[in-house]
Image (cartoon, grey):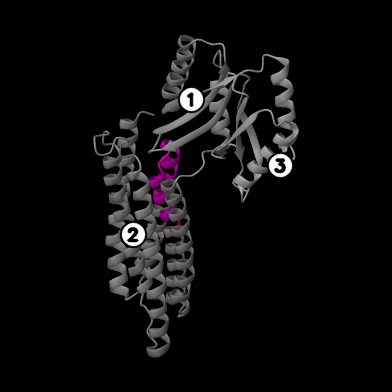
Amino acid sequence: MKEKQREKEIIKTSIIGIIGNVILVLFKAFVGIIANSVSIIMDAINNFTDALSSIITIIGTKLSGKKPNKKHPYGYGRIEYMTSTLIAILILFAGGMAIYESIKSIIDHYQNGTMPSFEIYSIIIIAAAIVVKVSIGLYFRHKGKKIESDALKASGMDALFDSILSTATLIGVILAKFANLYVEGFLGIIIGLFILRSGFEVLKESLGLMIGNRFDKEYVTEIKKAINSIDGVKGTYDLILNSYGHNKNIGSVHIGVSDNLTAKEIQKIERDITMLMYTKYNTIMTIGIYAENFSDDFSKEYYSKVLDIIKKYETVLQIHGFYIDKDLMLINYDLVISFDDNNPEETISKIKKEKEELDSNYKIIINYDQDFSLS
């Protein structure tokens, strides 16, 4: 889906949510004030925060669609992650207020014997509101998944939890109306805790995206397979991807090529990879080159000895960029060390020492690469 079309879908969905929530706010506020019910009034306030979250989503979507400029050359795509964070804060606020007001209601009931007074139309309005809220939640989640919008998915989750809160409110209304039993304050606390949990989950996901999560292993594997399929590529290494919003990535990768290729042949390979990444994966890719010289028996045998050594170390995930310069008596290669290794420099030092003990004629340079996409 093109970015402009995606933006229109997000805004359209958000406007529908705003209209639906404003209607719910008006009806619930009317019922809550007439019945003197703290749970219904808090439910109305909760719907009001949902309307605000939809407004925030629209603003965030418009801002994230701005073109890159001199001040922000990577664009504004990450603003969408910030809007998800703001929505999470609103969810947490709603959950905290629900618990606070519920506790006040419980205290007031046991100190002064206060009970809300409901009419039949109150039950009908709240029941209808639940149906509307569930519909809004499912619609937002469906649209969020379809167009890959974290903000819409967060709003959808919030709406579905709100429908649970409204259901608990309805139960409290029925029990108060027909059994003269006070439960709404206790139900409000329980539901408030669920809302807080939802808010923390949304907050965790949005903050993770802003900090920079690892891309899905399946996605990374697919990209490496696609690059490896290009003629002349002997291996794909050190793949790094940075997200700057929906389908806006900037990354780098190293490829292995034969050391007898000309600059012209290498440039064609680089161009093919650049075009592939931009057109298929929406990624601006920088490409580095590793020359590989496994053509002679000496290099093959030496490489085999190195493999025998690094196999002893479970945290070593990959070796690449292996090159032997016989004129300079130099061996150079990179090792990818897992983040599970608490001291990767020490691991590399041990490997280097073992290899030097086998053959001290060559100078060995081992470069430490971090585990950005392997494990």
Quadrant of image for the N terminus = top left
Residue 359: x and y in percent read 72, 30
Q: Which residue is mark 3?
A: 313
For the question of whether residue 138 can be seen, the reply is no
Q: Answer above or below: position of 168 versus 214.
A: below
Rounded to the nearest angstrom, the CA distance separating label 2 from label 3 is 56 Å
Instruction: Using a 10 Å C-alpha cutoff, classify the residue at mark 2 as few (fewer than 14 neighbours), some (14 to 19) or many (20 or more).
Output: many
Q: Which residues are magenta?
A: 135-161
Residue 366: x and y in percent read 60, 35
Q: Which residue is mark 2?
A: 47
Front in this rendered view, residue 201 or 97: 201
Q: Answer above or below: position of 69 versus 175.
A: above
Residue 99 is covered by the magenta coloring: no
Q: Secondary structure at mark 2?
A: helix
Q: Which residue is mark 1?
A: 288
Sequence-first disc among 1 and 2: 2
Residue 158 is covered by the magenta coloring: yes
Instruction: Using a 10 Å C-alpha cutoff, classify the residue at mark 3 as few (fewer than 14 neighbours), some (14 to 19) or many (20 or more).
Output: some
Type of residue at label 2? Asn
Type of residue at label 1? Gly
Residue 340: x and y in percent read 62, 48
Q: Answer above or below: position of 84 versus 283.
A: below
Instruction: Using a 10 Å C-alpha cutoff, classify the residue at mark 1 as few (fewer than 14 neighbours), some (14 to 19) or many (20 or more).
Output: few
Tell which tag, 1 or 2, sits nearer the viewer: 1
Rounded to the nearest angstrom, the CA distance separating label 1 from label 3 is 27 Å
Front in this rendered view, residue 165 or 270: 270
**Residue at the limit of the structure toward the bottom, as seen here:** 111
Q: Residue at x 45, y 40 (%)?
A: 145
